[in-house]
DNA sequence: GTTACTCGGTTAAAAAAGCAACTCAGTCAC
DNA sequence: GTGACTGAGTTGCTTTTTTAACCGAGTAAC
């Protein structure tokens, strides 16, 4: 299913993966600003123009992991069972993410994941670009929810909730607690937040 | 020194290596005739035209290991200390090869190497093409030795000696003896053969 | 204040690789 | 013998990658 078949496509995916991995690993080791795109290209064994063909900016080398989830909220809403309210669908989706400790929920204590979030949140240019991603996500969700100001408002609120929940989870884990330990609170927080949204 | 510098060159070398390794490994496992070039291309993760850009024929997928040594005899002669006779230079070079158990001397008991020689000598099309390689080698050596029929004759004799020596060594090892055990005989044989040549 | 770096990002041309479709030879079925 | 296959190589066309050179902003030297 996720095998697109074809040598070309396979190699492209592999190259993209190699670049992303090399970049994140270097960033985690030395910090975003102390690693140049040249370093990353060298580590990934490709040339600089090739790097920029895969990722439009240096920031995207980090944020592609979020970018891959871009529009997910909108998709969840569109794919929901008929009769199900959008908020409910998003609520369940987030809960499912918590249950499998999906990194995007913030509820993941793998050292790399924690360090990765640390990197994103403490590097201004990354945090900045991340919010731009979230705006796109918001727009897509708004379209999925309908038209007019109502849809936009609701989209903004839902994504704000998601953001706060993830950030809260991450904070608790950054303070040294385990994901398993935090899980019940995370679920409770999510339930409360999404309930208030209705 | 063996770092050609440049991304392109490095990747080319790597690809060539990958193709050659995949081919030899498949040939050793299934036999030359039961492996198609498509299989090899697939194993090396490249397309068929690319394979043929690196190796002109299927046989060369095996023989490139000899091909890489092509013209070596001529080089040895040309690079010899002045005053040194060509035969002596070639003799010493062969002895040095024996001392480091260079596969081309036949004096190497690594299972892969033995199996590889087995493969070459028992596959008609490979043996055939190998002699063609040796003819080229002979021509190059003849040019290095001078002009005229004399040079050609001597080149032929020298390479014949080399061939017989390698074949003899291989035979002993194929019979189950270790390279280390055979080494003294191999040196003695080489000394005798090259001495007779003078 | 100019010179010379470094770094993010781009461009144009050339090399390399992929793809699909082809030729040509052998081979097996019937 | 003819029709369908398979396998070695080839051909043209497109996509991808390398290369070297560049731009523009920042910054450190002197």
Image (cartoon, coloured by chain):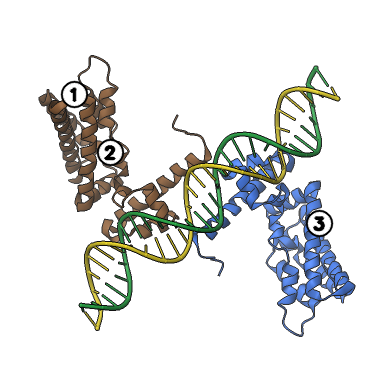
Chain colours: A brown, B blue, C green, D yellow
Q: Residues within 10 Å of mark 2 (few under 14, many from 20)?
A: many
The one of D11 and A155 positioned closer to us in this rendering:
D11
Left or right of residue D20: residue B18: right
Is residue B76 shown above or below B116? Answer: below
Q: Mark number for residue A87? A: 1
Tell me the distance, in whole angstroms, between the alpha carbons under discs 3 and 2: 62 Å
Q: Residue at x 71, y 52 (%)?
A: B60
Q: Is residue A183 visible to us here?
A: yes
Mark 1 or 2: the one toward you: 1
Taking depth in this image into account, of B125 and A74 the one nearest to the observer is A74
Q: Whole-percent x and y of residue B190?
A: 81, 69
The structure residue drawn at horizontal position 77% and vertical position 58%, both measured from the top left corner, is B133
Please give the name of the residue rendered at 30% of the width and 40% of the height, measured from the top-left corner.
Answer: A67
Name the residue that disc number 3 marks. Answer: B131
Q: Chain of mark 2?
A: A
Pick whichever of labels 1 and 2 is earlier in the sequence. Answer: 1
Q: Position of residue B136 (x, y in %)?
A: 78, 62
Q: Which residue is mark 2?
A: A103
């Amino acid at each position: 299913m996720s095998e697109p078949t074809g040598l070309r496509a396979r190699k492209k995916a592999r190259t993209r993966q190699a670049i992303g991995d090399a970049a994140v690993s270097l960033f985690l080791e030395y910090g975003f600003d102390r690693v140049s795109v040249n370093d990353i290209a060298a580590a990934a064994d490709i040339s600089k123009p090739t790097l920029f063909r895969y990722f439009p900016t240096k920031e995207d080398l980090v944020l592609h992991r979020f970018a891959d989830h871009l529009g997910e909220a909108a998709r969840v809403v569109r794919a929901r069972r008929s009769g199900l309210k959008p908020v409910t669908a998003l609520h369940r989706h987030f809960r499912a993410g918590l249950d499998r400790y999906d990194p995007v929920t913030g509820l993941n204590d793998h050292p790399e994941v924690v360090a990765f979030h640390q990197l994103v949140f403490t590097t201004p240019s990354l945090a900045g670009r991340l919010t731009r991603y979230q705006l796109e996500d918001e727009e897509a969700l708004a379209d999925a929810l309908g038209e007019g100001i109502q849809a936009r408002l609701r989209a903004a609120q839902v994504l704000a909730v998601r953001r706060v929940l993830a950030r809260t989870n991450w904070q608790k884990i950054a303070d040294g607690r385990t994901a398993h330990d935090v899980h019940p609170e995370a679920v409770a927080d999510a339930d409360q937040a999404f309930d208030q949204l209705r």
